[in-house]
Amino acid sequence: MQDNQHTLRCKYTFEGKGLHTGQKVTMTLEPAPVNFGIKFKRVDLGEDALIDACVDYVTTTARGTTLEKGDVKISTLEHLMATLNGLHIDNALISINAQEVPILDGSALPYVEAIMKDGLQEQDAPRRYFVPAEKFVYRDEQTGSEIVIMPDDEFSVDLMIDYNSKVLGNQYARLTAKTDFASEIAPCRTFVFLHELEPLFKYNLIKGGDLDNAIVIVEHPVPQEELDRLANLFNVNTLERAPEGYLNHLELRFPNECARHKLLDILGDFSLIGMPMKAKVIGYKSGHKINTTVAKLLREAVKAQHNL
């Protein structure tokens, strides 16, 4: 049975704010023809302001993945791209009126809920896959992060995170062909440690961050004075540390939600190689930097294998 390409069945519009810029943004996803791939259009810059969702254009990975081509820049796109990858959407045009993709609730769930109400449109063209020729290992000696890629008959990810955190512990997440991406991976939100917040503010980041779109991990009890100061930064009345080690008695969607979110990020970053993979991915302490570094190496193999 032929495995065909898919696109969206309808148009979907999302409004929100960028996590780092804090800008209000409107973004529309719409169907696209076969072999179109995934493209972004900056409608605020003109009709020709297009950029392919391709790792060739990745410029920075500080707290998110950013693409740039000329004046066209798209940032924090990983949750959206993970959605398209996780739902097996091959072709789509994404029109956006600002630089940064809206953060919404910090996960991929709002995208999935909208798209899955209508289902996907099967197209009359086969999917093309990238199959690595051999086992591939990449290790970042500075951080201890590692990603292993092995040829396989299907795509899967085994992922472990270790932040030397008493709150998180060592967490493990897995995705196989039997995993329901929509219910098991898409709902998992981004996370940040309390001690990272002030430096991020100082670097002019997370202007759009709030307690509705991120899990904030608090390793140790914090003086109320400091919590009050952070509450002022977040424009909320009060902040508290829950006994479990999270701000404001946050209810986790899964015990290993943070590891599942890192798996979501891998799906988003690896989608930038330009086509689905048949491979087993093993990740340890992964992040956008190592994800996109490996994706760039894989992209070169994709070009060679498919004569791109």
Image: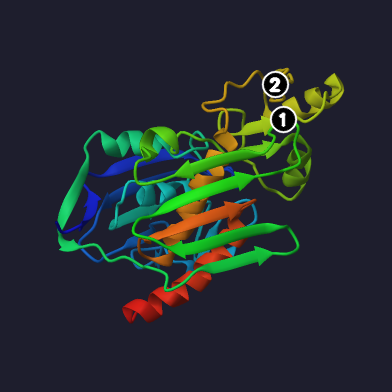
Tell whether 61 sits left or right of 274.
right
The part of the image, by quadrant, that contains residue 49 is bottom left
According to the picture, the residue beneath numbered tag 1 turns out to be 167
Quadrant (top left/top right/bottom left/bottom right) for the C terminus: bottom left
| Vertical arrangement, residue 256 with respect to residue 49, above or below | above
Rendered image quadrant of residue 125? bottom left
How many residues crowd around disc 1 within 10 Å: few (fewer than 14), some, or many (20 or more)?
Answer: some
> Mark 2 and mark 1: span between their CA atoms?
7 Å
Q: Quadrant of the N terminus?
A: bottom left
Element under disc 1: loop
292 or 237: which is nearer to us? Answer: 292
Amino acid type of disc 2? Glu
Does residue 158 lie above or below 166 as drawn?
below
- For the residue marked with disc 1, what is the amino acid? Val
Q: Residue at x 55, y 57 (%)?
A: 65
- The residue lying toward the viewer, choosing from 9 and 163, is 163
Image x and y of residue 216, in percent: 67, 32
Left or right of residue 17, residue 130 in this image: left
Q: Which residue is mark 2?
A: 244
Discs 2, 1 touching: Cβ within 8 Å: yes
Color theme of the render:
rainbow
The tag on residue 301 is none
Q: Residue 154: where, in percent of width, then height?
A: 35, 56
Indicate which disc, 2 or 1, sits on the residue closer to the N terminus.
Answer: 1
* Residue drawn at x 52%, y 39% as measured from the top left: 260
Residue 239, placed above or below residue 116: above
Of 7 and 203, the residue lying toward us: 7
- Residue 194 visible to an observer of this rendering: yes
Number of residues whose C-alpha sits closer than 10 Å to that of mark 2, classed few (under 14), some (14–19) or many (20 or more): some
Q: Position of residue 217 (x, y in %)?
A: 70, 32
